[in-house]
Amino acid sequence: MKIRRGFTLIEALIVMAVIAILAALGTLGVDEYVTSAKATKIIMNLHTMKKALWEWYVDNRDKVQSDGRVKIGNNTKPIQEHQIDKDGLDLRKYLKRLDASGIKFNSTKDETFTDANNQKVTRQRTDLSEGCYGVCDYGTTIHENGSKTTDRNKWYVGYHFKTGEEAVREKIRGRMKVAGGLLLGTADAHPVPTNYSGDEAKSREVAVWLQVR
């Protein structure tokens, strides 16, 4: 008469451990795939936006002033202010032509601060919001010696990473050499100041930008 023997406790624990390891490896693989897919989508969207902005420029070059600002109607101001002002550039029309109308633009925000005269001032905020795409020029750079350089003839399209998309940012960092023209920087299309380094500098690289002109 045969006696059927079940699993011992040790054998059962080994099987459970193997299953747990395989499940963990599977999860890591899925996470890596999702991160890579997000990075690819962001880069593709930026190149699509670049193409849309170039098409806009070809149609509206007479509105672009010599200093890089844009005149629409009676308003002459930096390109980002037109873009967030109810999409005054009408970029959505150009994106629609490229079958990319689903790109989420930056939302308009106002910020209030105290100026040098201790007066409360409210102005339109043009930094990209988390999870949004937008257009920005290089604007004004304040150098370490206190001097300022304004270069609004450099235009960028960009994306502000959401909280928790640090892995996506690092994936894009690894592709910067082959993607061409990408810049990791602040929410207003500037590189992180050189007085920051290491992890602190990385934490301030909240957006990825692609130069258009």
Image (tube, grey):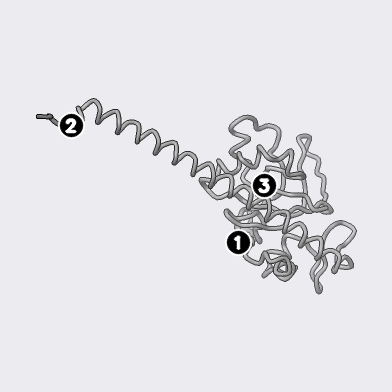
In the orientation shown, which residue stands out farthest toward the bottom? Answer: 73
Which residue is pictured at 35% across the width and 35% down the height? 20
Q: Name the residue beneath numbered marker 2.
A: 6
Number of numbered callouts drawn: 3
Q: What kind of element bears circle 1? A: strand
In the orientation shown, which residue stands out farthest toward the top? Answer: 10
Circles 2 and 1, Cβ within 8 Å, touching? The answer is no
Measured along the vertical axis of the image, is residue 169 above or below residue 73?
above
Q: Earlier in the sequence, mark 2 or mark 1?
A: 2
- Say which amino acid is labelled 1: Lys
Q: Earlier in the sequence, mark 1 or mark 3?
A: 1
Q: x%, y% of residue 134?
A: 68, 58
Circles 1 and 3, Cβ within 8 Å, touching? The answer is no
Q: Name the residue beneath numbered marker 3.
A: 208
Nearer the viewer's eye, disc 2 or disc 3? 2
Q: Earlier in the sequence, mark 2 or mark 3?
A: 2
Give me the C-alpha separation between circle 2 and circle 1: 67 Å
- Say which amino acid is labelled 2: Gly
Q: Name the residue beneath numbered marker 1.
A: 109
